Image (cartoon, rainbow, N blue to C red):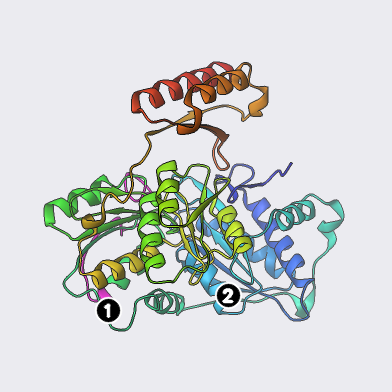
Amino acid sequence: MKKLFGTDGIRGEANVFPMTPEIALQVGRAIGYLFRSNSHHVNKIIIGKDTRLSGYLFEMALTAGLCSMGSSVYLIGPLPTPGIAFLTKDMRADAGVVISASHNPFFDNGIKIFDSRGFKLSDDLEERIESLIFEDSFKDIRVFKKDIGRTYRIKDALGRYAVHLKSVVPPHINFEGLKVGIDCANGACYQIGPMIFEELGAKVSSYGCHPDGTNINDCCGALYPDKIREILLTQGLDIAIALDGDGDRIVVIDDKGVIWDGDDLLALFSLYLKKRGLLKSSIVVGTVMTNSGLEFFLNSLGLKLQRTPVGDRYVVQRMLEEDSSLGGETSGHIIFLDKSTTGDGLLCAVRLLSIITEEERKLSDFYPLFEKLPQVLINIKVKEKAPIQAIPGLQDRIKQIEEKLGSRGRVLIRPSGTEPKYRVMVEAEDQSLAQSLAEDLADLIRKALT
């Protein structure tokens, strides 16, 4: 079992294992060694981050570790996670590293790693990095004298990424006349978010664009869309978007104040891209959390939903296997493999605005595209994430509930990959039934583990 990596890199409270500068130093050394051993040149590693106070701590520790292995390090500064993935590929780097804990509070931080193609590392590569970190003989491997690595700062990263984002907008389309709200969660999108829509002609009302190191995701962004929704309703905006701290997920609010999640967005993109013959295959990839109502809707379009475990890296892996061009998560990670190798909130927003501009319609005209089955999600904080099979009575209770729901409902219980929590999800045709069953399961887990 891996000691450091979860479903989305390494994550935890800053200065507490595993997110300590000592571990970050060793991660940098392992990355430098692993990618150097696979090339015949001085390897190039990009490092970006979000706006957390502890970002400086881990940026320097990673840099020191990489330079000790002879790597050339290119520091990007604050930029969305998908921007780092794009630049890793665009700059022909050997790997890219993002220092971010995504939607977590400021006192957490994390490390995500991309390969030279801009894709998150496989489990095998993450395990290889871990084995190097904890291998005693690895401590003595390093370079000396003139072989020690150098560090550079990339000053035009924002512009490069902006050009990439605008490339998804057809040349004949601009956003003039559109009033757009954007909440950047005081995170990595705080500069490029408002800028990109203004450059495309929209009138922008921004919120969450004044980071101070401790206010990232603080009652703002994708987890708290109510503030930007209030601004939309007060100012009569056409559309508003809320991003998370590292910019890889999005929540959208239409002109009537209705909040669109990732399932709603996948339905609209599936409809639009299918109509224009722009889908590479009939497969759209979601996760175990994807609402079954979306699956029924896709079937009506002649498309098929394939589910993966939670995590956009698993969605991307399945998309590559199935030659699928569209996938995503209910939480708001939307992936277009023709333009991105990971979830990208801004790219999704730009593409969405292009659609409503081209169709000359309000976003609310499309809602709802399908009927969602009532779905209840409960998070249970625990001291320790014991295996689900070890929780007394849980398997029998799940079996009883599944028999009761039949084919028109689902039960999903999983440990969080990034936090000390269990997540309970029940989907049923009736809201009150889903609520009562979810609470029943949550109570059973609480009694056993808290």
Disc 1 is placed on an element classified as loop
**Coordinates of residue 429 in the picture (x, y in percent):** 38, 31
For the residues bearing labels 1 and 2, Cβ distance under 8 angstroms: no
- For the C terminus, the image quarter is top right
**Highlighted range, magenta:** 198-222
The tally of labels here is 2
Q: Position of residue 104 (x, y in %)?
A: 46, 45
Density class for disc 1 (Cα within 10 Å; few <14, some 14-19, many ≥20) is some
Residue 441 picture location, percent across and down: 50, 21
Q: Earlier in the sequence, mark 1 or mark 2?
A: 2
Residue type at mark 2: give it.
Answer: Lys
Q: In terms of image quadrants, where is residue 180?
A: bottom left
Element under label 2?
helix
Q: Amino acid at mark 1?
A: Ile
The answer to which of 356 and 116 lies nearer the viewer is: 356
Magenta highlight: main SS: loop
Query: To which residue does mark 1 refer?
Result: 173
Quadrant in the rendering for residue 356: bottom left
Residue under the point 52% across and 47% down? 287
Is residue 218 in the magenta section?
Answer: yes
Q: Residue at x 57, y 34 (%)?
A: 414
Q: Which residue is mark 2?
A: 89
The x and y percentages for residue 230 are: 19, 48
Residue 216 shows in the view: no
